[in-house]
Image (spheres, rainbow, N blue to C red):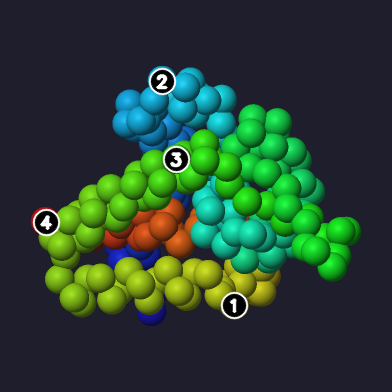
Amino acid sequence: MINHADKQKKDRLIKEVLEAVKGIQHKYQAEDDEEKEWLVQNSPTPVIAELLKELTVMMLHVLDAIGKLEPVNGITISKQFGFSKGNVSKITRKLLDKQIIVIEYLPDNKKEILFRTTSLGKEIYRLHLALHQQIDLGVNKFLQRYNEDELQFLVTTLHETLHASWIHSESNSVQDTDKLLPSVTVAEEMNEVMAMLNKLDSRNLRKAKAILNDVFFTEYED
């Protein structure tokens, strides 16, 4: 027999998780501004500080990819970092216009375009790298408050979330329409979560883990 009190409590917790996920989305939008502010404030020159104000988060990510792999072509950037070829093409053109990167050709293949950072691009790349090192330190310090079991629970939950299918889950096989609608709503929300997570690089995924960890475990601190 279903314990209705337990079911209500579980439904409430699921609702709180979904609300927290929406809050995380807004938090990331705010953190983009916070990270941009950090980059500007820590810029080595006023020229770089002004230039950074014009760069989008995606432009910084593509520059980060070029800085790590240079010389590198657009196809490799697209495959390694999950950016669409169209976006890579548009962003590299903008970075070229701002003289942050340059084009290089192979001696025996003039058709393949490779990208390298300029001296200006290298300074911005190193500054962006320093930002992520700062973030990594903050995330590590944040996660130290949790024990091994708690961290393992979060890692397991996130891995299962990444591989779960919300469309074909057993909970969606209920025929009762009144019971099915809440499950569909949850599936839609979780699809949004999956889409958000799939857009993150490894560093931002670690940040997501930290935030979700805090959301989950504060519920059990009675």
Answer whether residue 131 is visible to the viewer in this image: yes
Query: In the rendered image, which residue does mark 3 sit on?
Result: 123
Q: Please, what secondary structure does the residue beneath circle 1 have? A: helix
Residue 141, position as x, y percentages in the image: 17, 56
Between 65 and 167, the one nearer to me in the picture: 65
Which label is found at residue 170? Answer: 1
Q: Please, what secondary structure does the residue beneath circle 2 have? A: helix
Q: Classify mark 3: residues with Cα within 10 Å, few (<14), some (14-19) or many (20+).
A: some
Disc 1, disc 2: CB below 8 Å? no
Residue 213, position as x, y percentages in the image: 29, 59
Instruction: Say whether residue 80 is left or right of residue 152.
Output: right
In the image, what residue type sits under mark 3?
Glu
Classify the position of the N terminus by image quarter.
bottom left
Disc 4, disc 3: CB below 8 Å? no
Q: Classify mark 1: residues with Cα within 10 Å, few (<14), some (14-19) or many (20+).
A: few
Query: In the rendered image, which residue does mark 2 sit on?
Result: 46
In the image, what residue type sits under mark 1?
Glu
Query: In the rendered image, which residue does mark 4 sit on?
Result: 222
